[in-house]
Image (cartoon, rainbow, N blue to C red):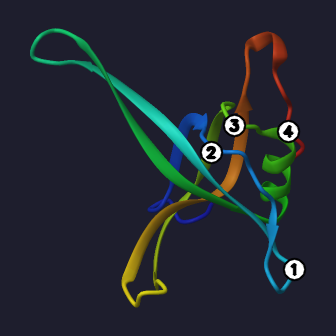
Amino acid sequence: MRNANNQVQLIGRVGNEIELKETASGKKFINLSIATNEYYKDAKGEKVQNTTWHKVTAWNKPAELMYNLLNKGNEVLVQGKLSNRNYEDNEGNKQYITEILVDNFLKMEKKDKLVDLPF
């Protein structure tokens, strides 16, 4: 088993059209955003929706499968690990990114349309 100290699992909706990209060395990857929603009642008793956007990156085979199987708006379960990185932008400012690096995923569909993924 992989390191159990850094595992994440989310169910949410894909928030962007997925574009399959390739590094200079030939590794394929995708970047996508996944929205998760929480609901609660405020002090007035009114229902409030809180949406959180998560940056997700997949490499190689999972990236290719996600690109071929998912579209904006699809509900998906992703499993992977959290990764933190930083870089300097064009203005010299340090930018920090927290993202989920995908190991596995499952396209969520109604029971009558269950998809069996090939991995």
Q: Quadrant of residue 29?
A: bottom right
Q: Give the spatial CA distance, label 1 vs label 4.
A: 24 Å
| Residue visible at 79% across and 55% down in the picture | 62
Mark number displayed over residue 72: 3
In the image, residue 71 sits, relative to residue 90, either above or below, namely: above
| Above-or-below relation of 4 to 113 | below
Residue 102 as seen in the image, left or right of residue 8: right
- Closest to the camera, between mark 1 and mark 3, is 3
Q: Which-is-in-front pick, marks 2 and 3?
A: 3
- Contact flag, marks 3 and 4 (Cβ < 8 Å): no
Q: Which mark is first along the chain, 4 or 1?
A: 1
Q: CA distance from mark 3 to mark 4?
A: 19 Å
Question: Which residue lies under the disc numbered 1?
Answer: 26
Q: Is residue 96 above or below residue 64?
A: below
Q: Which residue is mark 4?
A: 117
The answer to whether residue 91 is above or below residue 21 is below
- Check disc 4 and give the amino acid type: Leu
Marks 1/3: CA–CA distance:
25 Å
* Image point (75%, 37%), residue name: 71
- The type of residue carrying mark 1 is Gly
Label 2 vs 1, first from the N-terminus: 1
Which residue bears the numbered disc 2? 78
